[in-house]
Image (cartoon, rainbow, N blue to C red):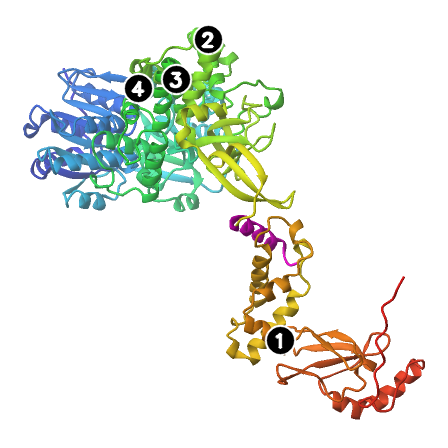
Amino acid sequence: MSAVPAPLPIDPLLPALVSELTRARRVVVEAPPGAGKTTRVPAALLEAEAFGAGEILVSEPRRLAARLAAARVAEERGEAPGGTIGYSVRFEDRSSPATRVRFVTEGVLVRRLLAEPRLDGVSAVILDEFHERHLETDLALALVRRAQEGLRPDLALAVMSATLETAPVAEFLGGCPILTSDGRLHPITIEHLPGPDDRPLERQVASAVRRLVGEEPSGDLLVFLPGAAEIRRAAEALEKLAAEAALDVLPLHGELPLAAQARAVEPGRRRKVVLSTNVAESSITVDGVTTVIDSGLARLATHSPFSGLPRLELARVSRASATQRAGRAGRTRPGRVLRLYTRADYETRPAHELPEALRADLAEATLALMGAGLDPERDLAWLDAPPPAARASARTLLGVLGALDASGRLTPVGRRLLDFPLHPRLARVVAEGERRGIASEAALAAALLAERDVRRAARPGLGEARRGADGPSGPSDVLELAERFEEARRSRFATSTLRHLELDAARVRAVERARAQLARLVRTRGEPPKSAEQADDALRRAVLAGFIDRVARRRRPGARELVLANGRSAELSPASVVTGAPLMVALDADEQRGRSVVRLASAIDAEWLLDDHADQLASTDEFEWNPGSERVERVSRLSLGSVVLEESRAAAPPSDAASRVLERAVLARGAGAGGMSDGLALLVGRLALLREHFPELGLPDDSERGVERAFERAVAAACRGRTSLRELEGVELADELARAQSPHVARALREHAPDRLRLPGGRSTVVHYEPGKPPFIESRLQDFFGMKESPRVCAGRVALTVHLLAPNGRAVQVTSDLAGFWERHYPSIRRELGRRYPRHAWPEDGRTAAPPAPRPPRTR
């Protein structure tokens, strides 16, 4: 006989909810934490005649929530789960032909919607705790909406949340009704820390529990912590207080056995301190709780940016999540909440978690939708559409894994991947293991990679202090994990064995559940290997198939630095057993101080890539500059992305392509490369002067890059037909640039901007042309005897500036008016130079004096 359930705030809303859902078939329910929506709404639909004998599916974000919610509703009806009220979660099904209300995880609901788009036999779907916005949540909403608008217009849908902005959801559902429930049964008082607390989290928790147990004479305490490891440390820190105050300290998280979970949520004989992950935020009622201690932290579901595999990341919870947690305190009487962070910290947190659809890896969802015959972009409307880049990345990965063909259609391999409840990478590992006759071993490898690392020291660093150079070595971290796991399994996971192997018991249990489920799904197709060594190689090849885009090579023998196929760099953790292999697949990595550290790797042979993945390899034949030999080389490579598998080099034959490579190398070195150039600046100055005074020549406009562009043109001309710096020795870039000019420009250079000028005595001097300055010449003053006026260029339009030098080579006068110099300045300079250099002739009139004869060249 069922007990009369205690009234809850949601109860007055139930008649209107049933009425609106019967009429509109869609409704959004907003009910604060503790209102009772998880248990009362499904029960109300069960009793409503409008929904007939059809099944009511209620999705929950976690397995634990689905199990406990089903147990609570069944208890209120005086039943046990599996009758009218049942549940279906991963690894477990408690239902029967009589089941009318079935609590399911979001993933189970999505798989059913894809397999049975009509949901025959189902009258209503309830999406509970929608505010968490998991990818499966949004996908389920989109699929139910699609069913309502096509195959099942009679299907009812209720979207429920405590902290959701309901208007966007109602608008997405065609402007459906929004029903709002009253608040919690009892008020709660919320406190924050006055300032940050830098102590370890378990010490903060111990202090808070001691204080609140002393201040609150009764009522259980619920402590929210990020994960199982933090729960374990907090429990150890509370041991002394628990003995003193007669407290039961009980963990609550999804990896616990069902019996342990039940002890945490059911009434106890003594006062309880329940240490929980965020599984207790919603859907679950922990009887007797009046006080909540909130660490403000959680391990949120995300995906590895390295591999795309699901992972949990430590993060601050949103304000909405903090509200959910606080709501657990006011269920039976006025409650109290202590947040282990400051109010300023709370106010800077985001209002809600960012929907997973906007940040998650989409490969698994894309494959599932395509397997159901849906185009994720064309056939489905999303509440928040995933970014185009994430969609494209998902399709690219599926193509690399062989799940899609070149036209984007599912392949037979892709259809087989759909049979496994795994990320496509891991499903590919299992499928390849089947083909190679090692299905069971591949299933274990996939389970190990899918779940959290079973080693206790498995977080960033991975036990580097203990292992490193003196640690074990082997071909694969996956094989090493599998060996440890199998040893523990042979001992029936005895505590002593787990301790000896340094394995985490909860994670080992999770791996065993996943392995057992996969073992029921796999089938051996290929011939089993004949030896243990061949079996190990087969498993490593299966792992390679799932991570082909994560092939890596050591930068040099023995080094931990890796270059990855995607071009990125990474470092192999010292804890990896893959100590010597030059080539490997990088299976997972952590970001540490801005660098990627590969935690798990598996060695491979280059021949495996040629045998199994030739379509992923690229053969290139190109010219490259070798700075050591200072020549262009022809390089042939076989590569997987940025990882080079084979390479051959030889001197490049002359060609336009080789000359361009040489040109780029010379330009990178600058004007002095190969001993070239001093006359280039002179030529550039001559061209600039012609451009200014002979615009009809049509020379290119001058600019800040004029010299640089001229240098580039000269280098291009010099490199034509050459392949090494040795061939450029002695090449004068000015000559190359001059030869590149048109005939009329070359003639103008000779006639109007000469590079040298002959003086009256026969001496030849260089004419200097510098950008922005008049051209000039320089020589000893005596060399200008007999020259009445300054020499000119550009058809007489430009007078040269003359630098008149004393016998010691220093200028005594700089002038562009030589005639004025002879008349005004020479007499005084002549007297001074005559005193200082009496052995030289200093005639009175330089204009008519004969210049000295040029000195004959010296002979040895």
Question: Which picture quadrant has residue 795?
Answer: bottom right
Q: Residue at x 30, y 42 (%)?
A: 386
Mark 2 element type: loop
Q: For the magenta stretch, what is the residue range?
A: 656-671
Between the residue at mark 4 and the residue at mark 1, the CA separation in whole angstroms equals 93 Å
Earlier in the chain: of badge 2 and badge 3, it is: 3
Q: Mark 1 points at which residue?
A: 772
**Three-letter code, disc 1:** Gly
Mark 2 surroundings: few (<14), some (14-19) or many (≥20) residues within 10 A: few
Magenta portion: prevailing SS class = helix
Question: With respect to residue 508, does 197 lie above or below?
Answer: below
Q: Mark 2 points at which residue?
A: 531
Instruction: Decide which of 110, 580 is in the foreground and name it.
Output: 580
Dot in front, 3 or 4: 3
Mark 3 surroundings: few (<14), some (14-19) or many (≥20) residues within 10 A: many
**Three-letter code, disc 3:** Ala
Mark 1 surroundings: few (<14), some (14-19) or many (≥20) residues within 10 A: few
x, y percentage for residue 533?
48, 12
